């Protein structure tokens, strides 16, 4: 039995204790985690410094270094997140649809944990704590496998959290951590369907694709967002310009940022220069279709086919003119990743058509795509945004980390 | 592009029309299917006769021949099923959790179809119509791939249903059928994740395993049931004997039938002979542990380790004595398939412990495991019983064939 298999087996054993732990017990553990992380902040920062040194020596870019870096303030933010999760209602144990059947059986659907959740992620150490807290609250054992860039930070964070679990009287193995960051071990993790009930990859498109294709257990696909804003022929153009600017520029690296602007031909001449004025504030690189360049001129680059399939994650925006809502819907359903899509229009029927026919996790009328996340949607927390249609779609909070079991109370009933 | 890929693409195109079809339209199509199947019953029976002849020539067993055979009465039953699906409420379009956020956004969760559902199944032609009707009602396009034994029956059934769709004004491609029953084409189907959103295998453990391991899209695992009845030390033994008899013998080939009987040592001497008397009525072959054979004698075969992992699907029952509920729970969680599990006990706390700690889709107290199905649970219809924890667990009706999308009504909101 490999090291990983032994660990996954311990996770499965811890599952039984955690699955039936009460809300009070889980909250105590979360608060213990929060206190221990705060108390041992120095230990975390020292470990993080080791990661940062190695990353600098490796020539990591500034923006990635920034994602990796922890400060006392950031640790405080992470700890505050854990306290918030403790304050959320416990989803486990809720019984829905309980009713008495004609034969006297009382049948109800009880919310239960999924079991053991594997999380494969990249360089951000905050994911280590966020994911562990959400899994713990929802009664799930977590097996964390972070990127090699954050190995020292993650090791410190996990070891503190496991000490806190023990202090709170729960098994240390409720939070498991894969120390070996090699690809071989990640691949092995994807085969352990006897012990790991579901895998959630968090990171770039390449990582997610690998997990989806290779995992033997169910996977929750998260995050890839090739999002569109469609400005209709009957749009309020001032609102439209503000929305595309917000959707593109407020945080270009995140999955709910817009990547392509679609504009109805009828308003393109008036709208495109307005939009450009906004986007120029951030020097957004525009890549347009032929008709776009006729209006905005040669400063706009020519958009290739593949641009329309790309999640730039940067200050780059593809633009395409379309005949109207019908062509916009078809374009979005072909090029989009089913994440967040927006129409700007004053027309009631056009808005309803767009809501009905666009196939995505979140479809907006007259609002920025940037709102797609668990906090903005009122879920209180978020483990990721599902872009698949099974199990969960859109922002996933605690409920999305649960399954159900039917419980049936009988009095000796047999089936005829 | 292969024949299958071309078909899957047509299915994806039909999805858009069917996904936004109204309840009236879908019900009209279902009623047209019911009428056409009835009118052209003779055509179905002739095609079925071809399948039966081939199967007989092939030496198919009587019980399998019986599953394959259609009669006028059986066709009537199938048609009645379609009418019942038409009468069920339409799950699509329901909006839940709609609320106004502090920033004025109105966010709701709307129930939408999954898209294109692939069904890979074996020799039962009734599945062809049942599955098509459930998918149609829930707004999903279906791609059916049945077994080669039923190819003539299935071809006739599908061609009639497609004619009915056309008559009702919906695209014929709402119901697609894979004529090629080779394994190569089944394998190809598992790779078409661009067109098929989810695969549901229906059949034996081997088929399900193959699909789970090879499919590139999400799979809903159905049906394998290694179910237990545990007779506690404080059980009403008369009720216990009736339940194990019903759970084993009322229909041994189905997935909710019991395969193993666990008995608390304290009542084994009294209970086992009682149970045997019931089970002898159907000449059930008993395979027991050492302690069981000490009580019931050598007519009981010795149970091997693998017997406890086997879904016999026949008049065979494995028996094991256990110390009490704790050992029973551990045994079930190790050997079971997470389908249906039952405890017979008079003790309130023992019952609650079993309900809490057994990890299965349906957990029973004092009632036969045979009740696990969509009709008995009040879902009105059933496409299968999920034994996985993701998306759906337990009997799956129309709601379980749906996903959701968030719809957001804004008035120009942008994110700070």
Image (cartoon, coloured by chain):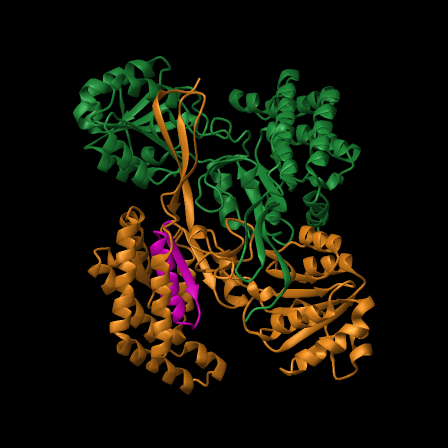
Chain colours: A green, B orange
Residue A130 location in percent, x, y? 61, 30
Whether residue A192 is situated above or below residue B181 in the rendered picture: above
Residue B230 location in percent, x, y? 71, 64
* Foreground residue among A407 and A298: A407
Q: Which corner quadrant of the image does residue B284 belong to?
A: bottom right
Q: Which residues are magenta?
A: B115-143
* Foreground residue among A217 and A206: A217
* Foreground residue among A121 and A228: A228
| A236 lies left or right of B256 | left
Residue B32 location in percent, x, y? 25, 63
Image quarter where the N terminus of chain A lies is bottom right
Query: Does residue B384 appear anywhere in the picture?
Result: yes
Query: Does residue A297 appear anywhere in the picture?
Result: no
* Residue at horizontal 67 percent and vertical 78 percent from the top: B278
Q: Residue furthest left?
A: A266
Q: Is residue B333 magenta?
A: no
* Residue at horizontal 46 percent and vertical 47 percent from the top: A390
| A299 lies left or right of A75 | left
Residue B292 location in percent, x, y? 78, 74
Q: Is residue B119 magenta?
A: yes
């Amino acid at each position: 039995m490999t090291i990983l298999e032994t660990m996954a087996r311990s996770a499965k054993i811890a599952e039984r204790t955690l699955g039936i732990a009460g809300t009070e017990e889980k909250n105590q553990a979360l608060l213990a985690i929060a206190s221990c992380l705060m108390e041992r902040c120095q230990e975390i920062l020292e470990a993080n410094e080791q990661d940062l040194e190695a990353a600098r020596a490796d020539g990591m870019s500034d923006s990635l270094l920034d994602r990796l870096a922890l400060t006392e303030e950031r640790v405080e933010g992470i700890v505050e997140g854990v306290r918030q999760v403790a304050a959320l209602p416990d989803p486990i144990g809720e019984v829905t649809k309980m009713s008495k059947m004609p034969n006297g059986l009382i049948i109800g659907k009880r919310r239960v944990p999924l079991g053991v959740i594997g999380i494969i992620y990249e360089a951000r150490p905050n994911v280590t704590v966020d994911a562990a807290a959400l899994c713990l609250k929802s009664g799930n054992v977590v097996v964390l496998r972070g990127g090699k860039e954050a190995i020292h930070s993650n090791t410190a964070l996990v070891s503190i959290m496991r000490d806190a679990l023990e202090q709170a009287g729960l098994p240390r193995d409720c939070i498991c951590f894969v120390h070996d960051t090699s690809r071989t071990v990640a691949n092995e993790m994807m085969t352990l369907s006897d012990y790991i009930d579901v895998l959630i990859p968090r990171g770039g498109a390449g990582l997610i694709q690998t997990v989806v294709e290779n995992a033997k257990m169910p996977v929750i696909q998260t995050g890839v967002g090739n999002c569109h804003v469609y400005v209709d022929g009957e749009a309020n153009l001032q609102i439209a310009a503000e929305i595309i600017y917000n959707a593109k520029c407020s945080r270009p690296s995140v999955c709910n940022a817009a990547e392509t602007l679609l504009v109805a031909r009828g308003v393109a001449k008036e709208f495109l220069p307005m939009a450009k004025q906004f986007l120029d504030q951030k020097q957004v690189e525009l890549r347009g279709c032929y008709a776009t360049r006729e209006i905005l001129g040669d400063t706009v680059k020519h958009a290739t086919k593949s641009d329309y399939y790309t999640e730039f994650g940067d200050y780059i925006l593809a633009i395409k003119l379309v005949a109207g809502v019908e062509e916009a819907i078809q374009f979005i359903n072909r090029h989009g990743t089913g994440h967040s899509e927006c129409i700007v229009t004053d027309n009631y029927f056009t808005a309803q058509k767009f809501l009905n026919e666009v196939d995505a996790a979140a479809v907006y009328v007259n609002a920025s795509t940037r709102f797609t996340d668990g906090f903005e949607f009122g879920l209180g927390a978020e483990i990721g945004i599902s872009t698949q249609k099974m199990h969960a779609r859109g922002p996933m909070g605690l409920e999305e980390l649960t399954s159900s079991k039917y419980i049936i109370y009988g009095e000796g009933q047999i089936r005829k």
